[in-house]
Image (tube, rainbow, N blue to C red):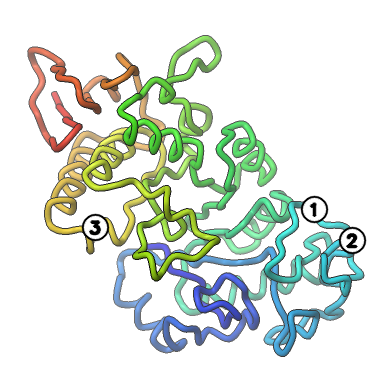
Amino acid sequence: MWFPPSSDSLAPQGYIPRRWNVLDSTYGSESELRAAIAAIEPVRAMADVVLNHRVGVHTGGADFDDPPFPDNRAAIVCDDESGVGTGNPDTGERHPCGRDLDHTRPEVRATIKNYLKRLQSVGFKGWRYDLVKGYGGQFVGEYNEATGPQFSVGECFDTDRQRVTNWIDATGGRSNAFDFPTRYLLYDAVVHDDFGRLMAHNNGRSGPAGLIGFWPSRAVTWVDNHDTEYRREKDHQANYDSTRHVPGKKVEMAYAYILTHPGVPCVFWSHFFDWGSHTRKAIEQLIKVRKQSGIHARSHVEIRSATRGLYTAVIDDHVTVKLGSRDWSPGHGWEMAAFGQGFAVWVR
């Protein structure tokens, strides 16, 4: 279970961290955090860690504390827009919401590793690395090697699957990545009832067009998250892509895809708990199919059709999924296991 950032932060959501080691946040106190992690056992908790940037305790500058760096100004890259950094140039993309940290400095990396171990001490078992395009992927590989998480995933926000693959390569293959390419292709497919772009040719063979077509064992698939979810108009903020949430019953169709396909699928909390019993039942049926059929991150997909109004695929030769507005049946020998508006799943 992916928890939001749990450290003290300038922003209430936790994404502009101020004092890493202070685990009292807008979500609750450290004692409440420990209790929540213990309450979900044997489910394991994954911390959202924001390592690209920080802000000072009293200013947006270099007055870091809890923990400080040995040299706070040297911990900031020299090309940070604030002009206060004396470190080396940034190893990734710039981010304006805080002081970009210089991960090339051993003392910065040592401080980060101590912070991750602090999170492990309260019960976290894995990492969701925020904004990983902001610093070199090799550092995520080093942090994983130092802390041994049971699972980790990076937010490499890019719809080009080769670029996401390159980031995983940069970690030494030590971390998974969210499959942004699949998510946005799937969004377009279910919204427009046109599934052609879900199929691509990989080394002369047809297969899924997202990251799951390149490196499925490292691809974490998803339908919506805290950045894309539906928000009432008064809750909208300019930095959220809230016009790109998967709408209505098409959410169930999208889950029919990710829960029958390779990769490691995510179920969004609000879809499961807040969207009503119909959506929850559909997701539960699809999870049951995945578990009972033994579909896993490396499962084989044979795409039979990917066109306007119809997507069909056979997974591991014993699960068939159909998406889209057109009627279709796999024929004799298949038993329907899950269905809803725009999708059906059969097993044999």
**Distance between the alpha carbons at the discs numbered 2 and 1:** 9 Å
Asked whether the viewer can see residue 319, the reply is no
**Quarter of the image with the N terminus in it:** bottom left
Which of the 4 image quarters holds residue 198?
top left
Identify the element where label 3 is drawn.
helix
Q: Are marks 2 and 1 in contact (CB under 8 Å)?
A: yes
First in sequence: mark 3 vs mark 1: 1
**Quarter of the image with the C terminus in it:** top left
Residue 91 is marked as 1
What residue lies at 48% left-to-right and 57% top-to-bottom?
A: 150
Of residue 221 and residue 151, the one placed in the foreground of this image is 221
User: In this view, which residue lies farthest toward the right?
Assistant: 86
First in sequence: mark 2 vs mark 3: 2
* 140 shown above or below 47: above
* 22 shown above or below 221: below
Residue 88 is marked as 2
What residue lies at 18% left-to-right and 54% top-to-bottom?
A: 280
Amino acid under disc 3: Phe
What residue lies at 57% left-to-right and 70% top-to-bottom?
A: 15
Amino acid under disc 2: Asn
x%, y% of residue 34? 41, 82
Asked whether the viewer can see residue 345, the reply is yes
Which of the 4 image quarters holds residue 63?
bottom right
Q: To which residue does mark 3 refer?
A: 272
Relative to 18, 124 lies left or right? left
Characterize the local packing of mark 1: few (<14), some (14-19) or many (20 or more) Cα atoms within 10 angstroms: some
